[in-house]
Each structure stands twice: as C-alpha cells, then as structure tokens.
Image (tube, helix red, strand yellow):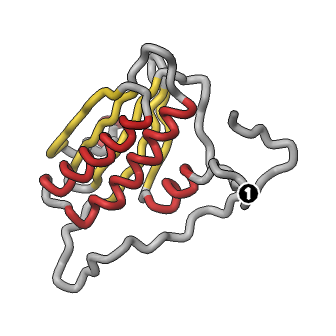
Amino acid sequence: MTAAQEIPAPEPVLRRDRLDYTPTSRSVSLSRHRVTRLVTQWGYPHLACDAALLVSELATNALLHGSLRGRLFRVELTLTAAALRIAVSDPRGERLPGVRAAEDDECYGRGLMIVARLADDWGVEPRAVGKTVYAELSVRRPGPDMPMGPHVLRAGPSVTRTAGAVRPR
C-alpha cells in the first residue's frame, strides 16, 4: 500500500461562510447571531446554541488576546457531512491559547475550558500571520428519540494548575 492510498480523502465541504470583524465587543455578539442564524438555516438547529457559545468564546479570546490595532479577526464556518467547524483567526500568532483552571474569584480564564468540554474537537493552527483557533461539533441529524434540550457537558481532561504557571495578561 502506498502513502497516497493510506491518507483518507478530506470530507467534501457542504457549506462555508467567512466574515471579517473589527476587534470590538460588538463583533462578538454579531458573530454569535450570524452563526446561530446560519447553522439553523443550514438545517442543524440542534447545534445552533452550542455553535453560538463556541464562536462567542473563540471570538472573545481573539478580541482580548489576539487583536492588533487596525487588524481584523475572521470567523469561518465550515460544514461537512461529519462536522461543523467554527474557526476564528487573529493576527497574533505568538500568543497561543491554552486551557487553564481559573480561581473562583477570577472573572476570566474559563473560555477554553468551556470550548474543550463542549466541542468534539478543538485546537490551534499556525498561519503565515497569526493563528486560527477552531472547534468542531459532530453533525448528527436529530431523530425522533434525540432530545433537543440543553447540551450535556462531556467529561474532559482534568486540568490542574501548576506552580509557577504563566498567567495570561
């Protein structure tokens, strides 16, 4: 078997949407509403709330940790037969995200924990300029016995705070 035969073909893209946003707090809510509308229009209303929460967390991180004056951040949705991918790209490639355990009295620091628990897969990809942080939800059409209520959080990897860990600014 050759190497070309071992590599599976990528899933064909069924739908794609991409929009650039100014790095303002208003852009986070605009991206959340756009994702909710598109995922519903694309026939997956049962994923709309989870997708909205994921894009909200990723866009907020891009705004707080990845923005540069005069540079936009991008939100891209890609739908295949297997997954809905939410990707947010920003211009700061040197600031890579990581899951951390926030203290009880901290206002920030839980976004990627939410992403890690909610998404079926997530990660960071470098770009020529900046980075892309993505989250994927498995696509399943709801059946008559599939509940349409709130998403149940899956158990994720345990996260512990290490001594001397660098805290994001």
In the image, farthest residue toward the top: 70
Residue 13 x, y percent position in the rendering: 19, 42
Viewer-closest of 15 and 2: 15
Element under label 1? loop
Query: Horizontal placement of 95 versus 77: left or right?
Result: right
Viewer-closest of 12 and 24: 24
- Name the residue at 52% across, 56% down: 116
Query: Horizontal placement of 22 versus 126: left or right?
Result: left
Viewer-closest of 166 and 68: 68
Report the residue marked by disc 1. Answer: 105
In the image, farthest residue toward the right: 163
- Name the residue at 70% across, 52% down: 106
Image quarter of the N terminus? top left
Query: Horizontal placement of 128 versus 84: left or right?
Result: right
Q: Amino acid at mark 1?
A: Asp
Residue 115 is at least partly visible in this image: yes
- Name the residue at 80% across, 42% down: 165
Residue 16 in which image quadrant: top left
- Name the residue at 38% across, 37% down: 26
Residue 55 x, y percent position in the rendering: 38, 46
In the image, is residue 77 above or below residue 96?
A: below
Image quarter of the C terminus? top right
Residue 47 in which image quadrant: bottom left
